[in-house]
Amino acid sequence: MAQYSKSYSLMTVGFSGITSRVVNVADAAELSVSWITVGTSSITIQGANAEGWTEAIPANAWSTVSVLGAQGIYAIQPGMQWLRILQAASTSSNTVTLSKSVR
């Protein structure tokens, strides 16, 4: 069976929001996040299993998967439909890339 990988830039230095874009990861066999930061910071990885493509996912549908306090590369257990990243401040020095492998 063929396998392919795709990367998503979820945050870059100077990103002026608290919440990244939402990525559909339902087909992922493997997930990882690469996080680089300048200074001290933390990010929160959240997942949801809400249905649909066009409607906003309700705030109460999100669950925290992990809170990261040090930069690095982290594996994430697949199985959720949607994934997003939250940061504490609206202006960041974070660069976050999501990598997804599909079989």
Image (cartoon, grey):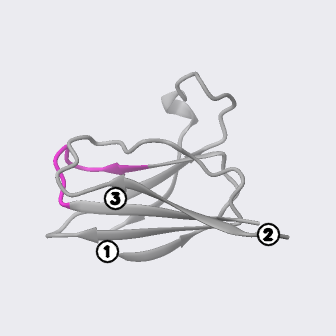
Which residue lies under the disc numbered 3?
Answer: 43
| Residue most extreme to the top | 55
At horizontal 31% and vertical 74% (from top left) the residue drawn is 71
Q: Residue at x 35, y 42 (%)?
A: 19
Q: Earlier in the sequence, mark 3 or mark 2?
A: 2
| Numbered tag placed on residue 71 in the rendering | 1
Amino acid type, mark 3 = Ile
**Going from the N terminus, do you reach mark 1 or mark 2 first?**
2
User: Does label 3 or label 1 sit earlier along the sequence?
Assistant: 3
Residue 5's quadrant in the figure?
A: bottom right
**What stretch of residues is rendered in magenta?**
85-93
Spatial CA span between label 1 and label 2: 31 Å
Q: In x, y percent, where is residue 94?
A: 25, 61
Using a 10 Å C-alpha cutoff, classify the residue at mark 3 as few (fewer than 14 neighbours), some (14 to 19) or many (20 or more).
many
Tell whether position 91 is magenta. yes
Mostly what secondary structure, the magenta segment? loop
Which residue lies at the image location 19% right of the left edge and 54% below the top edge?
A: 92
Q: Spatial distance from mark 3 to mark 1, Cα to Cα?
A: 9 Å
